[in-house]
Every structure is written in structure tokens, then in C-alpha cells.
Image (spheres, rainbow, N blue to C red):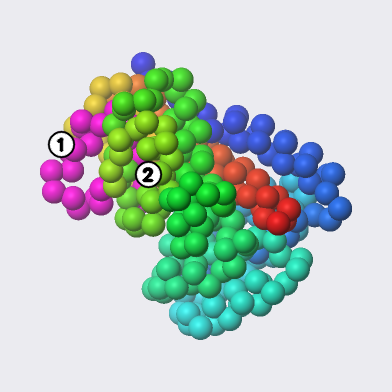
Amino acid sequence: MVEILRGKIIADEIRDKAKKKISKMDKPPGMAVILVGDNEASKLYVGLKEKAAKEVGIFIESIKYDSDVSENELIEKIGELNARPDIDGILVQLPLPNHDEDKVVGSIDPKKDIDGFHPINLEKHDRGENCIVPPVSLAIMRLISASNQPLDGKTAVIIGNNPIFSKPLLILLKVAGIEAQFLQKKTSALSAKTRGADIIIVAVGEKDFLKADMVKDGAIVIDVGTNKDGNRTVGDVAEDGKEKAGFLSPVPGGVGPLTVAYLLTNVIEAAKG
């Protein structure tokens, strides 16, 4: 029977610690969130981040743009936020509708890059230097470790749309002794490759994507997907895929709340300088 990896329980503990830390700071940390367009999953995540930030005492400024906003306007706004002393962390919610994500993210001051995707932070992470690590990567690793399974020598696949998501995660998996690779959903013979993996991390944003024939019996399955199914929020793992897993992070209640919790800790660390 599948064991559920409940990220929300761990997230609540992290948020409690964050709230205590902030209560002892001279001034509350400040965070700016930029949302572009009407992507439902993005709006959901931004809403969760705003709510969590307010609950622990972080000052939050939300900036919303229509999907046709120019890259120059986005970058100009980020430049203003970079210069503001009351803003310690900046987050641009990805994916962007039709903008150069690398260029936009690259305009954030690396010290304020609380999502951890700035090239300088990725390079530092690759070299093993101290830097901001993406909250989603930390969340995924925490859920994998919550399985309490020996990880050294295990194999993992990350299925996603954007390689930038996988880079820091691949580093963390390697440190844990896990041999991992990134695959796109159109990779040839994808099912055969995922079926051989001890750990599957799926983040394609497609309901019922990961089916039973793609899952090894007893695998650790981390579902990063966020999709709408009527009034429900669901992940990327199909029901028959869930039944074959040995360990599963649920949607909602898995990666999402834990990612938000680690984001809050990144804001606190950015505020410390």
C-alpha cells in the first residue's frame, strides 16, 4: 500500500520556526512577487505565497501584469525593486507567457533571488558554494528523505518542461548519492526510462500524465504538477500510477506547501544579507 509523504505537516513546522525568527528581527523582511498573465497554477501558487508570507510577518508587495507586458517593462520594474532597501527578496512567478525567462530572471539581484534560479546562484550551487537554493528543489529533497529509504545508489528521473528547474535538483540528488537524469515529456521511450527508476519526479503540468506503465513497483513518486480538474486541484500522476508507487507526495498537500515554506526561509536569509 502506498505511503503518503505529507509535505504540509513538515511545512507547518518550518513556517512556525520562520515566524519565531521574524519576531526577533529589527524589522520584518520584505518580499516582492511578480505575476504575469492568467495561468491558473501560477495564480494559485502566488496566492499561497502571499498568504503564507503575511501569516509569518513578511511584508509582501504583489505586482500583477497582463500577459502582453513587454520584457523591458518587467526588467525595469525588477531594477526598481533591486534598488529598494525594504525589499529583500524578489520572485517572478514562472512560467512566463511569452517572455525570455532567463533574461527576466537574470535581471534580479542574485542576493534578492529567493527562487534561486539566477545564473550566478546556479553556478555557485554547482561549485558547492553558499547561495540561495530553489525552494522547490529543497521541498522535493525533503519529501524524498521523508520516505526514510536508503538513497545512496538509487536512480531517479526528473520529467519536466524546463531544464532550468532540474539543474539545482540534479546537484542535490547527486550529493545524496542518487544517479539522476532530466527527461522531457516527449523523450523517446520515456515509459521504459521512468519504469527503471527508483525515484520519479514529475513536473509537466498535465493531469493523468504519469500512468502505471511508467512507474516501477514501490517507487518514490514526487508529484510537482498543479492542474485544475473542475473545482479540484490535481497533480500529474494518474490514479493507476499512484497505486504502483511505494511512496507518493499528494496534490494538494505535498510539494506545494513545502516549497512555500522554504521560500519564506529564503526571504529571511536574504534579509540577513
Q: Residue at x 75, y 68 (%)?
A: 85
Residue 122 in the magenta stretch? The answer is no
Q: CA distance from mark 1 to mark 2?
A: 20 Å
Kindly indicate whether the residue at mark 2 contacts the one at mark 1 (C-beta within 8 angstroms): no
Q: Looking at the picture, which amino acid does disc 2 mark?
A: Leu
Q: Residue at x 28, y 24 (%)?
A: 244
| Extent of the magenta region | 183-205
Is 246 situated left or right of 31 in this image? left
Quadrant of the image for the C terminus? bottom right
Is 11 situated left or right of 190 in this image? right
Q: Residue at x 28, y 43 (%)?
A: 181
Percent coordinates x, y for residue 26 in the rendering: 86, 53
Q: Looking at the picture, which amino acid does disc 1 mark?
A: Ala
Asked if one can make out residue 92 in the rendered structure from this viewpoint, the answer is: yes
Q: Residues within 10 Å of mark 2 (few under 14, many from 20)?
A: many
Asked if one can make out residue 245 in the rendered structure from this viewpoint, the answer is: no
Please give the residue where the numbered disc 2 appears in the rendered image: 170
Q: Residue at x 34, y 32 (%)?
A: 178
Quadrant of the image for the N terminus? top left
Please give the residue where the numbered disc 1 appears in the rendered image: 192
Q: Which numbered dot is residue 136?
A: none
- Give the residue at the far left of this rendering: 189
- Mark 1 or 2: in front is 2
Between 218 and 157, the one nearer to me in the picture: 157
**Image quadrant in which you'd find residue 239:** top left
